[in-house]
Every structure is written in structure tokens, then in C-alpha cells.
Image: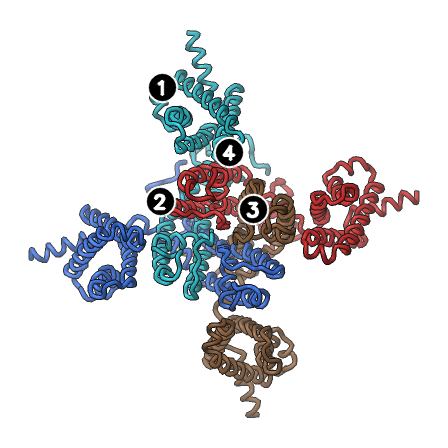
Chain colours: A red, B cyan, C blue, D brown
Amino acid sequence: MIKQKLRDRIHEIIFEADTPAGKLFDVVLLVLIILSVLTVMLESSEDWSAQYGRVFFLLEWAFTFLFTLEYLLRLYTTRKPLSYALSFYGIIDLLAILPSFLSFFFAGTQYFVVVRVIRLLRVFRIFKLGIYLSEGDQLRKAIIASRNKITVFLFTVALLVIIIGSIMYLVEGGQNDGFSSIPRAVYWAIVTLTTVGYGDITPQSDLGQFLSAMVMILGYAIIAVPTGIVTSEMVKDGRKKEVSTQVCRFCAREGHDKDARYCKYCGSLLNAENPPIA
Amino acid sequence: MIKQKLRDRIHEIIFEADTPAGKLFDVVLLVLIILSVLTVMLESSEDWSAQYGRVFFLLEWAFTFLFTLEYLLRLYTTRKPLSYALSFYGIIDLLAILPSFLSFFFAGTQYFVVVRVIRLLRVFRIFKLGIYLSEGDQLRKAIIASRNKITVFLFTVALLVIIIGSIMYLVEGGQNDGFSSIPRAVYWAIVTLTTVGYGDITPQSDLGQFLSAMVMILGYAIIAVPTGIVTSEMVKDGRKKEVSTQVCRFCAREGHDKDARYCKYCGSLLNAENPPIA
Amino acid sequence: MIKQKLRDRIHEIIFEADTPAGKLFDVVLLVLIILSVLTVMLESSEDWSAQYGRVFFLLEWAFTFLFTLEYLLRLYTTRKPLSYALSFYGIIDLLAILPSFLSFFFAGTQYFVVVRVIRLLRVFRIFKLGIYLSEGDQLRKAIIASRNKITVFLFTVALLVIIIGSIMYLVEGGQNDGFSSIPRAVYWAIVTLTTVGYGDITPQSDLGQFLSAMVMILGYAIIAVPTGIVTSEMVKDGRKKEVSTQVCRFCAREGHDKDARYCKYCGSLLNAENPPIA
Amino acid sequence: MIKQKLRDRIHEIIFEADTPAGKLFDVVLLVLIILSVLTVMLESSEDWSAQYGRVFFLLEWAFTFLFTLEYLLRLYTTRKPLSYALSFYGIIDLLAILPSFLSFFFAGTQYFVVVRVIRLLRVFRIFKLGIYLSEGDQLRKAIIASRNKITVFLFTVALLVIIIGSIMYLVEGGQNDGFSSIPRAVYWAIVTLTTVGYGDITPQSDLGQFLSAMVMILGYAIIAVPTGIVTSEMVKDGRKKEVSTQVCRFCAREGHDKDARYCKYCGSLLNAENPPIA
């Protein structure tokens, strides 16, 4: 009984965020995740690695120990260990500690080490409970609502860059190393159309520069399209929210203005506690 | 009779997409087009061409054979072969197979080969029947509705870049190879105003850098214009769609709000199956 | 009398565009202006100049002759020659021909020659009468309506780039030639914040790259501001135009919906020729 | 008494802007601030410094003298000198003069000198009283209203660039100096995603270029998000302002349409001076 109670208490701290202890746990976990990712990032730099290699090594094992402890506690306190272990966050939690152990057996494997960066995805779990949920939701909804439009747009862009790339390959291909193949010319077309413009591949001939200028002005015009899509979704969403959530007590209809006092469908008083002033 | 029936059946499969066989045909065709364009793209790369040249050659002839077969079937099954052959898609279909045959007679002609990329345009035929039609339509409508505004905008931009280019040619022309002629300076102005910023041509003098900075801030301000045009069209379009498609039975007028119960023109009940509750 | 009539007739052709002859004149003038500017642009290129220098010279004098003739005709046919000569377009018209004559006396002066590009501004006169007027007007109104907001925005950006530039000068100044003075660092800040990103000046130190990344993300966020300003003006403008221009015959009020039949202020029938159906 | 009156008079001139003298003071101060910042900027350039070093030195001390005089007057005339000295603008005013005096004692300290650029922040004090206040306020409100959305967005971008950077470090790290560590690869990811695109670090391998192209198209799509956020806030704000500021005399409620004649809450006539016409 007491053991079960302790388990439930730990479960509440680890999985929920509505107790002070639960909130503290989330903040500590957030700091640990960010610190551990910073460690991975700095460790990859040769300068830092040469100087603080030993510190990074110790820190890494400290983080791995703490995350392993947390993983085991999660497994222990949850009622359904298996379904947790196979859930999205369960797998992320495992991937957060596995690379360190694997690098123990297969020494020097750079690739495993970098996988530790996916620890960052664990941050989403913490934010799932935060105040930012609804905001993120709104953004996600606006993007989902305009999904089809974005697909059509991306498809058109894909077509465009392949055709532009092929033309530029014909125009510049012979005398310009940057346009040595169509895939490379398509890469150039994407760099140009998205206005990134590295400048690692640039047209040299007069005709090539003229065509590029056309492509840039085209990109100028069509960059407006995804913005227009997302913005109009958001404006529409904003309009919806100006309607109150009140339901008429007589005809049970919604959709009244926020400051409406009488039902616009049947004319009855909307809110008895809040009667009209006059 | 049976022959005509077979012809109609093939016509339905090839030209329409509302039967299972027709849908399957479209999917197979889509995959073939994408694979054949990928082949053209990779073949243009010297590395890939050297290694898999033989495979590409065989694949190319396989695609050409299939597309030729399709073209002949389209010609055979359609009631008006000539009007098909001279239609937009008829010409695209011919251009999709012609380059391979021409490269047989005029060996090594790189130019003919690249023309095969226009096979991609055939993809539009398939999408014409897809679910994305209405979305694409909406985008197209928003762009068409703002066509005049975009023309004025592009014209102003053209004027601007020629004047900016001429000024920069005077300022930087002497000491900077990048600004050796006005057309080149105009190319630089377009690269800068569209925020692509390759960096292949950059101002070197103090005055030139000052003027460039002004141009960039100008570009910052006017990039807002096409976005504003397209977005406001889309917002307007979105507002229109909030109106219901109901038609009044008495005065036959449309344009009622989605939650309206009574006709706003003649006052009669809009929908008998869905009477007001009170 | 006949002379005056001829003068009026020429005036109508040259200054107006509502007769067939006037329209033709505008089109011919437009083509001449574009060709003459193209000549100036190509002439500035050494390759073209070396090859077709003689042709350009002759073309230039042909254009100058025609524009001079036009200028004299304008002076002759207008009722107030002085007020025309001192008007904006009068000065532009003079500047369009002056450089050629000046280059006759002061041979080889590159600067005079380029001034001929301002001939392009004459194109605006033609478009003043075109169908694109109202569209351009709308754009201009949206920009004028948001003028104050844009001023505040540009002022804030100016402040920002000076402060960012000064910080980067401190951070990178010593070891990086690109940040050798604050004005140059401010130039870099503008290149970065506007997302142009030439790459002629880039941060080299770790701290410099970190700060640059912050500046870029800041630029990402504030590029939204001018777009938001212009777009919201355009959306507001679009909303206004959905209201009809009808005026009630009884209470003389405007602002009715496009499909309204009864005045929303006094209830009288709005349009007698177009009575309600029921 | 007279002394106090003089103090109040000076206070009015220095701190307020509603008298002619106060306005003149603000304009003079604005010009002095801009000139002094220009001096700092040009002084940092070696060319200018070598040529006009003496002029800059004298100008700098003239500005410092004037700003010191102004600071002392502010301290003297205000009723609460300490609370002014510790206020935001009090500290800025002190920081505007301190570096010059410090550079007197610690000669050659470049760092102190640049701090003088923060004099620019004093400009905000002047604008606080200007006509642009409400416009700036609107922009600020739109940004504050979308603060949470922008936080979520920036957080997602931060996550994205770390993950993209880590992947690119794995792909390009070995053979490409630009991707020598994860922080540097993250810097590249930010440069790319924000479409700045310096080109100081660019992918070299085929896989790297393919992934970069994906990142760019992703950046193309998500640059729409902050624009959408700010724009929809501004459109919402614009809609709010179409409501009149009229208050009903009977029920004291606001929020009426600009053309409303009767209170929409209690039905009484809204404006006695402006009665309905019919």
C-alpha cells in the first residue's frame, strides 16, 4: 500500500505538472536537457574538446546517469510500462540515453554521439503542459488548415525549379563549373528562388544573368503566396474567436457576438446573471 | 462494335480517372514521369553518367517506348485525333518522346536531351483530375484577381532597378569590375532588391555601400507590397466563403449568412426542414 | 484660325490619349523610350560598345532628334509654354534630350550620358492615362495610409543597425578586416537584417557568429512588421470597397451593403428601378 | 521665488515639448545627438580618423560639454533629482557623457568610446512626446499581443536549427571546414533558414546540397508564420478601430458601429445633436 502510494506520488511528480514538486521537476529536467545538448554541441568543436574534453566526458556521464534514473523511474511508476516504452516519448527517452552506453562499447563512433541531440525533443513533453499549448495549437491549426494549399504550392515550386534548373544547365553548363549537372542547377534554382542566395554558384554569362534576374523577380512574387495562405487562415481564425461561446438557454444556439444580450435567433435574454442595464 | 467498345474502354482508362483502372493508370503514369525526369537529371551529372551510363540509356529507351505506346493509344482511342494532337497536352505528349528519337539520328545533342524535362508538364494533366484542383484554383484566382496590381508593382520595380543600376554604375563603375556596365549593375540591383544577395558583385566604395544600404532598406519596405496584394485577395476570398450557398425559395436570392433562418431580402423562412426552434 | 486648330489637334494627340491618334502616339513614344534606354544600357557595356559603337551613336542621335521634335511641339502647342517648361514632366522632357547635346560639346563625359536613363521617368506620363491608374492609386494609398507606421519602423531599424554595428565593431573589429569601422559594421548589419546577406563581410569569431545568428533571427521576426502594416491597410481598403456607393433618397445616407434593398437607417426602399422580388 | 520660477521655466523647456521653446530645445537636442553619433561612427574609420582626428576630438568635447550642461540642468530643475538620476533616461543621460570623461583618464580605450553610441537611445525620449507616439504604440501592441505566438515560433526555430545543424555536421563535417563543429553548423542553419545566405559556409557534397535545398524550402514555408502572426493581429486591431468611441447616455455602454444612431443595448437615441434624418 505505502509502496503503491509512493509510486503514485513519484508518478505525479514525473508525469504531471500541477503540483509544486511536479513543476520543480519539469524546470530541473528542462535545465538538464538544455545543458546536456549544449555539452554535445561544444564537445563537437575541436577547440573546446581539446581543452575541456575531460569535463565534457564527466558531464556527459552525469547527464546519462540522471536521465537513466528518470527513465527507470518512469518505467517503474507508470501502470502500463510497455505502452509507455513503446510510446513516442518513451522511445525518445530511451534514445536520449542509449547513445552514451553504445559509445561505451563502440568507442569513437561520432555518429552515435550526435544522436544525443534528439534529447531536445524531450523538451516538447514539458511544454505540452505549459501555458504555451494553446498558442502552439493555433499555429498548428493554421498550418494544418492550409496544408492542401501548401502542398499545391510546394509541388508547383518543385516543378518550377526543375525546369529553371534544366534551362540554366543548358545556358551556363558548358563554361560554368557551378552548373555542371541538372541536380546542381536545380540546387542553384532553389537557393535563388528562396532568396537565400549563397553565391557559391552564380551565373557568369549575360544570358544566364538575365534569366537569373527573371527568376529572382518571380521568386519575389511567389514568396507572397505561402505568406498569404497562412495569414488568411490566421485572420479567419481571429474572426471566429470574436464570437462568444455563450449558448442561448431557450433555443440552444451559439455564435452570438461577445457583447450580445439577446439571442439573435429567438430574441430571449441570453444571460440572466448579467441583465441589460436600461 | 466490339472494337469500338474496346476503344471506348481504353479511352476511359487513359483520359479519365473515375474508374479504378483509370486511377491506377494515372498513378503508374505519374511514377513513370517522375522516374524518367530523375533519369534525365542524374544522366546530366558526369559522375553518375560515367558509372551508370548504360543503365540510363536502357531506362531512357524503356520510358520512351512506354510513352510512345501511350501516345499512340491516345491518338487511336480519341474521336478527334487531330484536335488532340494539336491540343496543349497533345503537343507536350509528343515533345516528351520526340527528343529521344531525334537524339538517335543526331547523336550527342545535349540540347535535345534536356528537352525531355518538359515531360514534367504532363504531371499537370494528372493533377487536373485530383483533389487538389480546387485549392490550386483558389491560389490561381487570388493571383489572377491581383494581376493588375502585380503588373504595376513589377513595372515600378523594373523602373527602380534600372535607375538604381545606372546610379551605381556611375558610383562604382570605374574601380569595381562587378559594375562594368549598366546591365550588370541592374543585375546587381535585382539581386539586392529581392534580398537574394549572391555577393558575386558587391559595392566597394563608401558611397556605394551607403547607397546599397538604402536600396536594401527600400527593398525591405517594398517586399511587403506583393505579400499585401496576395494576402488581401485571399482574406477577401475567405470572407466570401463564410456566406452560405442557400437560396431563398420565394425570392431566389443568395448571399445569406450561414446561420440565417429568414431571407434577408423578402423575410420568408429560408429552410423548411430546419425551422427556428423557439 | 486654321493654325490654332492644327495646334489644338496636335495638342490633343500629344497630351491626351482618348483619340485613336493620341493612343497611337503614346504607344510609339513608349516604344521609343524603352528602345532609347536599352541603347544607353547596352552602350555602357564595353563588349557591345566596341562592336556596335557606330550603331549606338546613330540610334542615339535619332532618338534625340525625335524627342527634341516632340519637346518643341509640346512647347508650341500648349497654351502656357513656360508653365509646361517648369512643370515636373517639362523638366524631365528637357533632361531627356539635354545630355546628348551636352556630350556634343563636352566629349567623353560618361556622367552626362547616363543621365539619359531618366528618360524612363517619362513612361509615367503615359501610364498616368492608362488603365493601371486606379491599381497604382490603391497601392499608393495603402502606402500613404501606413506612412507614419513605416517611418517609425524605419527609424527603429536605423537605431537598431547602428547599435548592432557598434557592438559587432567591438567584437570583430580587431581581427576582421570587414568590421574595420563602425559605418562598415552598420553596412554589414543592414545587409544581414534585410536578409540580403552578400557574404562580403562575415563574422569570424565564435562570439561574432553567435551575435550574428541572434541578429538574423531578430530580422526574421521584424521583417513581418512592414508586411503586416501594408497588408492590414490593404485588407481594410478591401473591406471598405464591399460597401455599395448607393445613397438613400429619403435620408441621403451612404454605407449600405451591396445587396441591401432597404435603407438601414430609415427603412425606405433604396432603389425604385430594382424593387424587391417578393 | 524668482529662482524657483526660473527653475520651473527651465524644467518646462527641457522636459516638456508643449511650448515653442520646449519644441526648439527638442529639435536642437535631436540634431546634437545625431551629429555626435555620426562623429563617433566616422571617428572609428581609420581614413577619417587620420585626416580629421583633431576636428573629431574638438567636436566630441563640445558635445560632451553640452550634454553635461544639459544633464546638470535636468538634475537641478527636477523636483526629485535622485529618482531622475536612477530612472531609465537618467542613466542613459549619464552614460552619454561618462565615456568621454573616462577616456580622459584611461587614454586610448576604444571600448569606452564606442559606448557613446548609446546616446542614440536618448532620441526615444524626444519621440515619446512626438506625433509618432500612437503609431509606435500600435506596432508595439501588435507585437505584444502576438508575444506568446512569437515565443513558441522562436522556440520551434531554435529546436529546428539545432537538429538541422547536427545532421549537417554528420553529413558534411568530415570533408568541409565550414561544418567543423555543431555550433558552426547551427550558425549555418540559421544563416540558411532566415534566407540571409552569406555563402561563407556552403554544403559541398551532393547529399549536403540536397538537404540544404530541403531546409531552404522549409524556411520558405515557415517565414510565412511570423508574418501571419503580426499581420492577423494588425488586421484584428484595424477591425476594432472601426467601432466608434460613442458612449450611450442611458446605459453608458460602448462598442457601437460608427454609423449607429440607436444604442444596440438599450435602444435609446445615441446622439441628440445628430438625430436621424427621416
In this rendered view, identify the residue nearer to me: B177 or B26.
B177
Q: Which amino acid type corresponds to the residue marked 4 in the rendered image?
A: Leu
Query: According to the image, label 3 marks what residue?
Result: D203
Q: Are marks 3 and 1 on the same chain?
A: no
Horizontally, residue D168 falls left or right of residue D139, namely: right
**Mark 3 → mark 1, Cα distance in angstroms:** 50 Å
Horizontally, residue C76 falls left or right of residue B225, namely: left
Q: Secondary structure at mark 4?
A: helix
Measured as percent of width and height from the top left, residue B140 is found at 43, 39
Q: In the picture shown, does residue A163 fall above or below D87?
A: above
Query: According to the image, label 1 marks what residue?
Result: B81
Query: According to the image, label 2 marks what residue?
Result: C271
Q: In the picture shown, does residue C171 fall above or below A139?
A: below
Q: Residue at x 43, y 64 (%)?
A: B210
Q: Chain of mark 3?
A: D
Q: Residues within 10 Å of mark 1 (few under 14, many from 20)?
A: some
Q: In the picture shown, does residue D209 fall above or below B36?
A: below
Residue closest to the far bottom: D2
Q: Residues within 10 Å of mark 3 (few under 14, many from 20)?
A: many
Q: Residue at x 89, y 46 (%)?
A: A6
Q: Residues within 10 Å of mark 2 (few under 14, many from 20)?
A: some
Q: Which amino acid type corresponds to the residue marked 2 in the rendered image?
A: Asn
Q: Residue at x 68, y 54 (%)?
A: A46
Residue closest to the far front: B50
Quarter of the figure with the N terminus of chain B: top left
Residue closest to the far top: B1
Measured as percent of width and height from the top left, residue B189 is found at 40, 55
